[in-house]
Image (tube, rainbow, N blue to C red):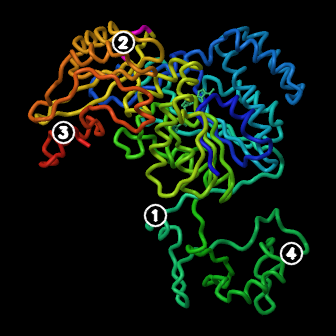
Amino acid sequence: MNELYYGDNLDVLREKIPDGSVDLIYLDPPFNSQRSYNVIFKDKSGRQPASQVDAFEDTWRWTPNTGKIFDELIHLDYASHQLKQLMLAFKQFLSTSDMMAYLTMMAIRLVELHKRLKGTGGLYLHCDSTASHYLKILLDHIFGIQNYRNEIIWKRTLGHHLSTKSFDRMNDTILFYSKGEKYTFHSQYEELSEDEINEKFPHIESETGRRFTHEKLEQSSNAYSKGEVRIIQGKKVISNLGWRWQQDTFYTRLAENPYLIYWTKKGRPRYKRYADEYLGRKYGNLWDDLMPMGSQDRERQGYQTQKTVALMERIIKASSNEDDTVLDPFCGCGTTIIAAEMLGRRWIGIDITYYAVGLVKDRLSKFTNVQYTETGIPKSYEDAVQLAKTSKFQFEAWAVYALVKGQPFKSKGGGDTGIDGFLYFTDYERKHHKVIIEVKGGDYKPKDIRALKQVMDREGSPLGLIIALEEPTRGMIAEAAGMGRWKLPGGRTDYPVLQIYTIKNYFDKLKPDIPDTSGTLQEAKKLIRGKDKHPKLPGIG
Ligand SMILES: C[S@@+](CC[C@H](N)C(=O)[O-])C[C@H]1O[C@@H](n2cnc3c(N)ncnc32)[C@H](O)[C@@H]1O
């Protein structure tokens, strides 16, 4: 069964994934770049996105927890002595820097991941030049130097606009290691266009109509050895060079296919290569043929670090077979999962951000018949209470996205703006509006309702929604009702200016009373440009 987990991959790996159970691991962890790692959501408003969420801002900072993990790693019985020595050496010169925090968090996870791989398995670690040199040493010590397979250079951008003081950094690095000496690997080939094929295979066999080219049968003269064959026509030795085949092999092959040999006008034999047997141009480790995600790409989910399905397909096809299990412990919006599903592999995805997991679920819903288990995602009111206790931020993000498909929001500075999310909709006059969402995981009072109204006025927003874990008191219901109703311009429907929607309502399958917000601004703009003369309104869904 496929598995989707919402949570920290370290916990999930330790608690849920058995040792030696996975064929292929791809991981694309947040890079240790200087900027705080933000998940920037699709900007439906057309303005610079206020909708940014620091999903795991402290993950790569040295905190008491990092210190604890470092100590744990040094005492872990299944981490090798060499790795421990390496980590101690890193610590000497990197001290408690961000880089050391990053390497500590990565090392413990890589040790666990290595343990989960089958003997024939492989791991691909996606990173960039910020940390790839450290990560390679780390992997050398976890997988063994002899199991290093490739450093893949993926050209991830076409843009030339980043730096005037150095060459633009245009690639990511993907480090590939196998667990052992015998591992799954299938070479991948680039298919050629018809014109390229015709150029490469210029001849047509008159007897069969097959397209072919021919190449010399001899190996280089260095390869000549006594026992090897000369092809003899009549009694004449036509070459002194070494040959591709032993004499017996030559005659066997010729018996199998009498057209195998192309004889030149001078009577020299040449070996035929057929276009219909050609697999394509073999890929090396420089991947500059896979286009980066374009702004208009259909697969684009608006998840900032989303990779392309084509990239994942190449990795999955090369290093797994059908029905194998592919694990992505930092799965983001699920690119690996989608590619694995399309290629008939089993998959396990883990992410710590609900927005990411929600996007994975949405993407999977477009397939017919995908079966998977979900773990960590609140399935009941009690689960939601538990999530609110574990992480206020994750609870808010879950409530905004899972309950009403809103865009979670957290101000850049982290201060409380009274806004936890937005929803967008379009009225009958084709004007865009937003609903301001505030999530309350604990106590809330009538004054919170008045405060939200002030935020709405400040933001020019006609509607507000409080999503609350606890049921509102009568006083609060009255306070919200007192804010009145708002009529959708150009239509007859009206909506409560401010309403309270509870987690219980959600699990009781009730919906908030708001306009249809299922469309995006891009769609709205299209409608406005007159591409669709009969839009379905209200909303643009
Ligand atoms: C670079 S993104 C992955 C993007 C992904 N390859 C895609 O195509 O969408 C890194 C992801 O790691 C997740 N993440 C960070 N720390 C994590 C942790 N400790 N456990 C699980 N997921 C984590 C983040 O939420 C983020 O979605």
Say which label, 1 or 4, has the lower sequence index.
1
Q: Secondary structure at mark 3?
A: loop
Tell me the number on the disc at residue 538.
3
Query: Foreground residue, 420 or 74?
Result: 420
Report x, y in % for residue 333: 50, 38
Report x, y in % for residue 358: 48, 37
Residue type highlighted by circle 4 = Glu
Mark 3 within 8 Å of ligand 1, using the beta carbon: no
Q: CA distance from mark 3 to mark 4?
A: 81 Å
* Residue extending furthest toward the left: 490
Residue type highlighted by circle 2 = Gly
Q: CA distance from mark 3 to mark 1?
A: 47 Å
Q: Secondary structure at mark 4?
A: loop
Q: Secondary structure at mark 1?
A: loop
Say which label, 2 or 4, has the lower sequence index.
4
Q: Residues within 10 Å of mark 3 (few under 14, many from 20)?
A: many
Tell me the number on the disc at residue 418.
2
Q: CA distance from mark 2 to mark 4?
A: 83 Å
Report x, y in % for residue 239: 77, 77
Residue type highlighted by circle 3 = Pro
Picture residue at 18% right of the left edge, 39% below the top: 538
In magenta, the rendered stretch is 415-419
Q: Mark 1 highlights which residue?
A: 193
